[in-house]
Amino acid sequence: MDAGVLTSPRDLENLQRELASLAKRQSDLEDVVLEVMERRENAQERATEFTGRVESLEAKVAEAEQRKSSVLEGLDAQGFTIAKERETLAAGIPGDLLKLYDKLRSQQGGIGAARLYQKRCEGCRLELNITELNEVRAAPSNTVVRCENCRRILVRTSDSGL
Ligand SMILES: [Zn+2]
């Protein structure tokens, strides 16, 4: 007013109203800025948390892979040892018998010979009848006896129930 810019009380009133409106708008914008900053902070916290989780999962995966490869190495070594042992054992078994065993093994799900345990074939789990038991009993110890049911080679022991 003093500078002569405002010429009427109405101009002053308008200006004051405009100033109040701008102050309100500024306060609203400050609220928005605060909210955005808060959200950004939350987002950063979550990102940090997720990064941590991803890192921990990656570490677990690496650890599991390490264990897997060491187990596989162990199995390889074991398989090699078993193959060697089998080779040594097979060398002491007559060729015909070994051939029969291998044939039965492939036919009978990997088990070509079974223990005769308490009158029962441990290959098919069936008990031998009296006649079969008598035949097995009568067979010389160096002959190959077989289960009448599953045809596997029967291995006689002191627990065979003969
Ligand atoms: Zn059997």
Image (tube, rainbow, N blue to C red):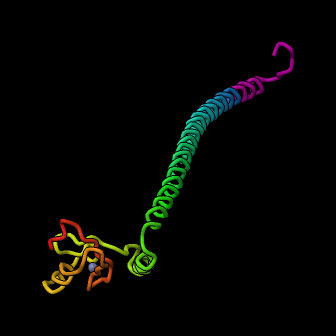
Question: Which residues are drawn in magenta?
Answer: 1-20
Residue 137: x and y in percent read 18, 78
For this view, does 140 lie left or right of residue 5? left
Q: Quadrant of residue 125 in the image?
A: bottom left
Q: Quadrant of residue 35 in the image?
A: top right
Q: Going 23% across and 80% down the picture, which residue do you hit?
A: 139
For this view, does 120 lie left or right of residue 70? left
Q: Going 55% across and 45% down the picture, which residue do you hit?
A: 66
Q: Quarter of the image containing the N terminus? A: top right
* The magenta stretch spans residue 6: yes
**For this rendering, which residue is in front, 108 or 155?**
155
Q: Quadrant of residue 37 in the image?
A: top right
Number of numbered discs visible in the structure rendering = 0
Residue 147: x and y in percent read 27, 81
| Above or below, comparing residue 63 to residue 75 in the picture | above
Q: Quarter of the image containing the C terminus? A: bottom left
Q: Quadrant of ligand 1?
A: bottom left
* The magenta stretch spans residue 125: no
| Above or below, comparing residue 58 to residue 80 in the picture | above
| Above or below, comparing residue 77 to residue 161 in the picture | above
**For this rendering, which residue is in front, 101 or 32?**
101
User: Magenta: predominant secondary structure element?
Assistant: helix
Q: Going 67% across and 32% down the picture, which residue do you hit?
A: 29
| Above or below, comparing residue 54 to residue 12 in the picture | below
Residue 4: x and y in percent read 86, 17
**For this rendering, which residue is in front, 122 or 47?**
122
Residue lying furthest left: 130
